[in-house]
Amino acid sequence: MPPAATAGTVLVTGGAGYIGSHAVLALKDAGRPVAVVDTLATGFRWAVPDDVPFYEGDVADSALIDRIAAEQGVSAIMHFAGSLLVPESTRKPLDYYRNNVVASRSLIESAIRNGIAHFIFSSTAAVYGTPEVVPVAEDARKSPINPYGNSKLMTEIMLADVAAAHPLSYGVLRYFNVAGADPAARSGQSVRNATHLIHVAAEAARGLRSEVMVYGTDYDTPDGTGVRDYIHVTDLAAAHVAALGWLEAHPGESITVNCGYSRGFSVLEVLDAVDRVTNEKLVRTIAPRRPGDPATLVAATTRIRATLDWTPRYDQLETIVGHALEWERQLDLRGLRP
């Protein structure tokens, strides 16, 4: 096995997608060499800067990963590729176990085979299921209530087991609800048939949808709608860069952190914020709860703030909404709308 590198290119899987493309921008802004591998099943080639080496393919293609590692001198992987819709996971669980578990196993094996020292994993608050205590801390009981959360937890367990047996350190970042877009409008959420609330609301504000569905008004929350901790995608990308820096500064150690702001907003509060920013009124349509959705998910963020060199810059709800709305405008101006 080749010796583990200490610094080199960061391979971003799913780097043509929403969060992955912002991580690429954050790495470039930090002066880090970066390469991208993406199937383009849901990502977009234009989302990867022209000066970033791009490989179209699957992370489960071990020969491809070997070639990228050799050509680019990869010392770290940021793994965003996978499937991420909770309702879809309840309908297509086998797809999620293939895309999120089997493919991740292959990628981790490729990392070990190529002496890649660090692995940053895109995980989720869904590993907690319905938390017993809110805000939920990293050491809370893990009890996913949908296949998506199960698939992410399985990969977390794999990473811990592999790191105990091989010279690999890892960072697990458990996202709460990711929203917004690059403040300079270099990238944003562009996926077709979006389900994330702020993206859906931004599309409705642009006239692309006639209404916003509110799934459930009978939760045990102040206004009956689900409460979530929304984190700006640029702050989240910065957390990935900070986590990689921490791994490089602490050889042999690994870390797991929540990514959020320790503040929750209900569905109706988010829609009210969109109304304030646009000075218009979104049409709301009440629908039954979706399967697999807990009532409240808010992050405890003491660990990430105390451990990583990370301070949120865009943690106001109106700022997140404003950047999402501007990105929707840019999609039309640049002819990029899917």
Image (spheres, grey):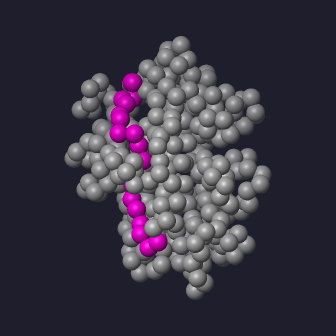
The image quadrant that residue 206 belongs to is: top right
Q: Check the image and name the residue furthest to the right.
A: 50
Residue at horizontal 44 percent and vertical 53 percent from the top: 308
The correct choice, above or below, for 202 with respect to 41 in the image is above
Q: Residue at x 69, y 31 (%)?
A: 330
Residue 337 position (above or below residue 239): above
Q: Is residue 132 visible?
A: yes
Quarter of the figure with residue 213: top left
Q: Is residue 265 left or right of residue 59?
A: left
**Position of the C terminus by quadrant:** top right
Residue 267 included in the magenta stretch of the image: yes
The answer to which of 275 and 91 lies nearer the viewer is 275
Does 184 lie within the magenta span? no
Labels in figure, total? 0
Q: Position of residue 200 (x, y in %)?
A: 53, 31
Residue in the image at 49% along x and 17% along y: 276
The residue located at (46%, 29%) in the rendering is: 317
Q: Considering the image in quadrants, where does the N terminus appear? A: bottom right
- In the image, 176 versus 242, the foreground residue is 242
- Find residue 67 and report its horizontal and vertical position in percent: 70, 74
What's drawn in magenta, residue-wise? 251-269
Q: Is residue 49 left or right of residue 258?
A: right
Q: Residue furthest left?
A: 132
x and y percentages locating residue 198 in the rendered image = 50, 32
Residue 147 in sight in this render: no
Residue 92: give x, y in percent of width and height. 46, 54
